[in-house]
Image (spheres, helix red, strand yellow):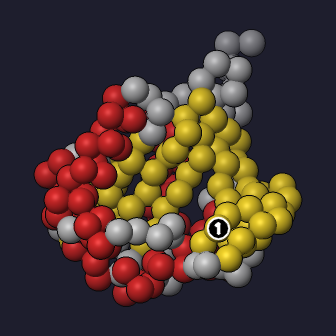
Amino acid sequence: MDLEIRPIGLTMATDLAAVYQENRDFLQPYEPVRADAFFTAGGQRDNIRTMVTAMRAGDRWPAMIYLGDRPCGFITLNTILRGALQSARVGYWVAEKDGGRGVATRALGIVLDVAFCELGLHRIEASVRVDNPRSKRVLEKNGFSTIGIARRHVFLDGAWRDEYLMERHAPPIRNYGQ
């Protein structure tokens, strides 16, 4: 599998719009309500500008998922907190036609390497709807454990939804000098 994670940039607006358009119905139950303009290249340029600003501020690390040269999803570290916490929240989605092939699992593994090795984070959190076992399995395959269920946690698809709250900590760093 020729999978690549590319940090977001304005040149990706057309790719992101195309993969969003192609998967609009598939993603609808899991995404907030979006205006039609969001699904256009211009809407994605605006969206990417906001993401790049947050990325430069150190608050977010967004990236496109590609199979070869074909965009197939999106993954991001959100709400990056420094100081005593050193944590972030991860969110991701993969195109419907690429589901079940390990794309999300591999993409998340790569982004966890970025989070722990490049960004120096200690803890990554995720929430996943209780009716989305495939996404929960992606998290579990990447070492996340369930810490509880948040009742009526997120308003999606016209209703308040329960979500599993999950976490993964950075692997311990061995001190070989002792």
Tell me the element at label 1: strand
- Looking at the rendered structure, the number of numbered marks drawn on it comes to 1
Residue 106 horizontal side relative to residue 173, left or right? left
Would you place residue 34 above or below residue 127 in this image? below
45 and 145: which is toward the camera:
45
Quarter holding the C terminus is top right
Q: Which residue is mark 1?
A: 155
Q: Quadrant of residue 60?
A: top left
Q: Which residue sits at x=65%, y=55%?
A: 126
Q: Nearer the viewer, residue 49 or 87?
A: 49
Which three-letter amino acid code belongs to the residue tagged 1? Phe
Horizontal and vertical percent position of residue 10? 18, 48
Image quarter of residue 71: bottom left
Q: Residue placed at 37% from the left, 35% from the top?
A: 55
Residue 120 x %, y %: 55, 28
Report if residue 11 is visible in the image. Answer: yes
- Which residue does the image show at 55% across and 73% down from the upper left? 30
Q: Nearer the viewer, residue 5 or 40?
A: 40
- Does the rendering let one see residue 137? no
Left or right position of 53 against 133: left
Residue drawn where x is 67% and y is 13% of the image: 177
